[in-house]
């Protein structure tokens, strides 16, 4: 990642270093010989920070932890000092049913956090590249939006224009945050930005304490919430290890630019995930064996925090994903969804001591 012709490895900052993606990214950077600064919200949160503490022992002298608050001005200045690459990963990801106040829970942390990180970038002359962790949700609001895209295919050239802080606040927050970062990049010429826009991120978690919405969503499936039948919701998916590789490639490749969708070409449904897991765990009675008709989802969805607008915009809708830029420009080879789902499930079992 150095790129300067010197032998000293570059120092990189990873915001949200104890999160699902952040912890994988920190580990991969350490494996590659980089010095890493990682921010955490609370260094005393033993369960969340433990994997990073173990990395410090495995890679002595390479990893330094900093406490930082997304909502606090100048909170990232110390962590960013001497860094050439900044990976801004930190941002809350909550599923719709877990959001009580869209502005407080997701919009403010995403936007204000991005502004505070950008402020630190502006004050840190060593920074040359910002890799911004966005989401496919900054490309579309509801699945129905993709029907208006060319060939009904998800592509980086679109921006989400339909989400609001009331309707799909997570997608709204990430869209506003990404646009803010692009505007900051355009206003100067010292550093360049690349955006990584992953689908639903799956795969083995390094910590059982992550608050990632993707882990929460799959936990509902694993615990048997849908044993009576899988609702017909499908997802654009990405393996956390592939997302990690995309971040590093976005930082290292001198020609990397713009936005990169990181997701498999085809979507994966709850029923698909259940079927994949049952190929190796056929006796698991918690996993659904059938698809649920649409009508009970429409009737019961609001009791689980899903509005009728959300159900109309997502239930039964599938589309293809154009991930060609990530393949051709970042060199990403996507893992099979079967490997991702099984690794995700078995890591979840192991962390909970279940069989």
Image (tube, rainbow, N blue to C red):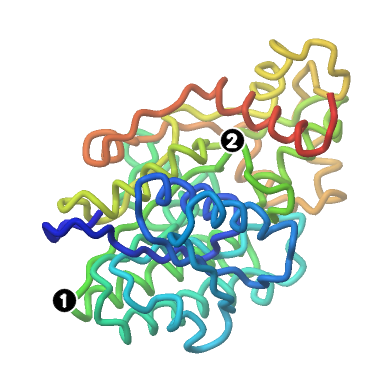
Determine which quarter of the picture holds residue 217. Answer: top right
Judging by the rendered image, the residue that carries numbered circle 2 is 203
Determine which quarter of the picture holds residue 344. Answer: top right
Q: Which mark is residue 189?
A: 1
Relative to the observer, which residue lies in front, 145 or 227?
Answer: 227
Residue 195 x %, y %:
35, 57
Query: Quick one: SS at disc 1?
Result: loop
What residue appears at the point 57 percent right and 34 percent down from the top-left corner? 317
Tell me: residue 4, above or below residue 187. above
Q: Residue extending furthest left?
A: 5
Relative to the observer, which residue lies in front, 138 or 66?
Answer: 66
Crowding at dot 2, Cα within 10 Å, few <14 / some 14-19 / many 20+, comes out as many
**Quadrant location, the C terminus:** top right
Residue 252 x %, y %:
24, 51
**Quadrant location, the N terminus:** bottom left
Tell me: residue 83, above or below residue 5. below
Q: CA distance from mark 1 to mark 2?
A: 37 Å
Query: Quick one: SS at disc 2?
Result: loop
Residue 161 in sight: no
Residue 347 x %, y %:
69, 33
What residue appears at the point 47 percent right and 79 percent down from the top-left corner? 76
Relative to the observer, which residue lies in front, 183 or 68?
Answer: 68
Residue 276 vs residue 190: left or right? right
Residue 120 vs residue 67: left or right? left
Tell me: residue 74, above or below residue 208. below
């Amino acid at each position: 990642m150095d790129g300067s012709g010197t032998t000293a490895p570059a120092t990189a900052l990873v915001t949200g270093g104890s999160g699902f993606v952040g912890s994988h990214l920190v580990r991969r950077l350490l494996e590659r010989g980089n010095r890493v600064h990682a921010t955490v919200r609370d260094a005393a949160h033993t369960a969340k920070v433990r994997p990073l503490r173990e990395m410090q022992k495995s890679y002595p002298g390479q990893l330094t932890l900093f406490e930082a608050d997304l909502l606090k001005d100048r909170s990232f200045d110390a962590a960013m000092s001497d860094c050439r690459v900044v990976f801004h990963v930190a941002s809350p990801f909550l599923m719709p049913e877990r959001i009580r106040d869209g502005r407080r829970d997701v919009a403010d942390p995403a936007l204000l956090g991005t502004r505070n990180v950008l402020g630190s970038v502006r004050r840190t002359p060593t920074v040359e590249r910002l890799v911004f962790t966005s989401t496919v949700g900054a490309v579309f609001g509801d699945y129905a939006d993709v029907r208006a895209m060319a060939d009904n295919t998800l592509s980086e050239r679109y921006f989400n224009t339909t989400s609001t802080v009331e309707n799909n606040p997570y997608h709204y927050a990430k869209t506003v945050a990404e646009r803010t970062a692009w505007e900051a990049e355009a206003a100067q010429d010292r550093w360049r930005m690349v955006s990584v826009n992953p689908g639903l991120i799956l795969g083995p978690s390094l910590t059982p304490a992550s608050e990632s919405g993707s882990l929460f969503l799959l936990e509902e499936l694993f615990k048997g919430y849908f044993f009576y039948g899988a609702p017909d919701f499908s997802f654009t998916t990405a393996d956390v290890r592939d997302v990690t590789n995309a971040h590093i490639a976005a930082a290292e490749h001198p020609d990397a630019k713009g936005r990169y969708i990181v997701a498999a070409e085809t979507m994966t449904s709850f029923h698909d995930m259940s079927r994949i897991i049952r190929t190796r765990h056929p006796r698991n009675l918690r996993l659904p064996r059938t698809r649920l008709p649409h009508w009970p989802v429409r009737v019961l969805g609001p009791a689980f925090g899903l509005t009728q607008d959300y159900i109309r915009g997502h239930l039964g809708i599938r589309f293809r994903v154009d991930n060609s830029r990530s393949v051709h420009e970042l060199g990403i080879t996507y893992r099979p969804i079967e490997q991702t789902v099984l690794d995700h499930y078995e890591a979840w079992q192991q962390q909970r001591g279940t069989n």
